[in-house]
Amino acid sequence: MNFIQPNKQQRGFLEFRTNQRYIPFGCNYFDPQTGWAPQLWQQFDEEKVKRHFDTMANLGVNTSRVFLTIASFMTESGLLSEVGIEKADRMLAIARNTGIRIEFAGPDLWEGIPEWASGYFAGEENAYFLHEEWVDRLQKFWLQFARYYSEEKAIFSYDLLNEPWLKWDSPLIRKSWGAEPPSLDHCPMDGSGDQAFLQFREQLTEGWIRKMVTAIRSSDGNHMITTGFHQLSMPHDPKDIYTLPGFNGKKLTQFLDYAAMHWYPYSSHEHVRPHLQDDPVWKNITLIQSSLRNGYAGKPMVIEEFGWYGGGEVVSWNEELPYVEEEVQTKYLQMVVEGTRDLADGWMSWAYADTPSSMDVTKKSGLVSEHGEIKMWGQAFKELSLQMVPKKA
């Protein structure tokens, strides 16, 4: 294995030293049987992880995104958790043996908020980005984590945070702004109202990104850095200059090595329905293409999360969605990959496996079932990987 770097002459990625083209083609990984949100590290089972990575490798996965957590990797003293790092070492050893590179994302709240950290988040939804002491802790985390793994070739990249989202109003927002935020009713998505406040929010998130990147680069110059932008961070309508997350994907990519976008058909009128009409499917593909074009900033672009469900019915965001055949899931996700070949430089399916306790489409969105049987989408993914991923010389 060698480090992966952006291709500065053309789009995409190259393997360091060999200069061979590298296309990250994989999935987001967590154990489907550890509850929701998945408690991967607190219930780490090395033998199960080995089986899962073997299955992923057999399906053509070459890159897997894995979530770090505050509970398992950060300590009250400000040092890295030795227990968490030891588990990450074991996962990386498994990854090396299977030829899979890992993109580490986080640290996030998937395993809850430790008691020592609860004070930061009490009544403050924007603490992750605006609480000075907490931001200082995050900088120290990334400095230590990146230093520890600076020579680890099985790491593809660092993802600063999964779908960062600055809440519109909070005590720290009011303190920084010096007043009550303007009403959301006066801030349409095209940015035609209250532009000063919208720009102020983007300046806050830019400062946060800069601090995290600086912390990593102070100790690790080998690994790429990105962050997993929500699809509203790269709106499909070019007129949508400002977006409510505060994290403007196109602007912030200038500080990152590549852009990472997540896309799901959220709105009910856009859902991929189990009927014969193809319009809802094609509409989603068209919107994804528009977002990629609008978000392009001269850096590689990875669709870091994309998914849909198949082989059952699910409840997603309190909406009951009907039974969808695996054929529908497979057709849609194939179209996402094939419809963005000229725009994206990598793809990571959501998720590795159906997750029975999930409260969204993850319940039936896997490459494999909750018990490890390869689904129709898993087989199609394998066939796509043979077409998409260049073979080593």
Image (cartoon, grey):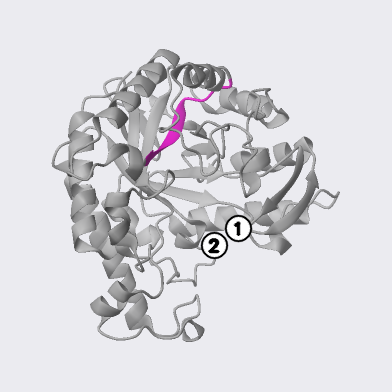
Magenta stretch encompasses residue 67: yes
Q: Residue at x 43, y 27 (%)?
A: 44
Q: Can you say which quadrant of the picture contains the N terminus?
A: top left
Disc 2 to disc 1, C-alpha distance: 6 Å
Please state if 301 lies on the left or on the right of 142 as rendered.
right
Please state if 141 lies on the left or on the right of 87 as rendered.
left
- Disc 1 is placed on an element classified as helix
User: Which numbered marker is on residue 125?
Assistant: none
In the image, residue 360 above or below residue 153: below
Q: How far from the left and from the top, in percent, is residue 271?
A: 71, 56
Q: How far from the left and from the top, in percent, is residue 39?
A: 47, 37
Q: Are marks 2 and 1 in contact (CB under 8 Å)?
A: yes
Asked whether residue 146 is in view, the answer is yes
Along the line of sight, which residue is nearer the eye, 168 or 60? Answer: 168
Please state if 5 lies on the left or on the right of 219 as rendered.
right
Q: Can you say which quadrant of the picture contains the C terminus?
A: top left
Q: Residue at x 57, y 53 (%)?
A: 289
Q: How far from the left and from the top, in percent, is residue 288?
A: 57, 53
Q: Kindly identify the amino acid type of the residue bearing the numbered disc 2.
A: His
If you read the primary sequence from the N terminus, does the residue marked by circle 2 or circle 1 appear first?
2
Asked whether residue 393 is in view, the answer is no
Badge 1: how crowded within 10 Å, few (<14), some, or many (20+)? some
Q: Kindly identify the amino acid type of the residue bearing the numbered disc 1.
A: Leu
Residue tagged by mark 1?
287
Magenta stretch encompasses residue 393: no
In the image, residue 221 above or below residue 314: above
Along the line of sight, which residue is nearer the eye, 339 or 260? Answer: 260
Residue tagged by mark 2?
236
Q: Which residues are magenta?
A: 59-68
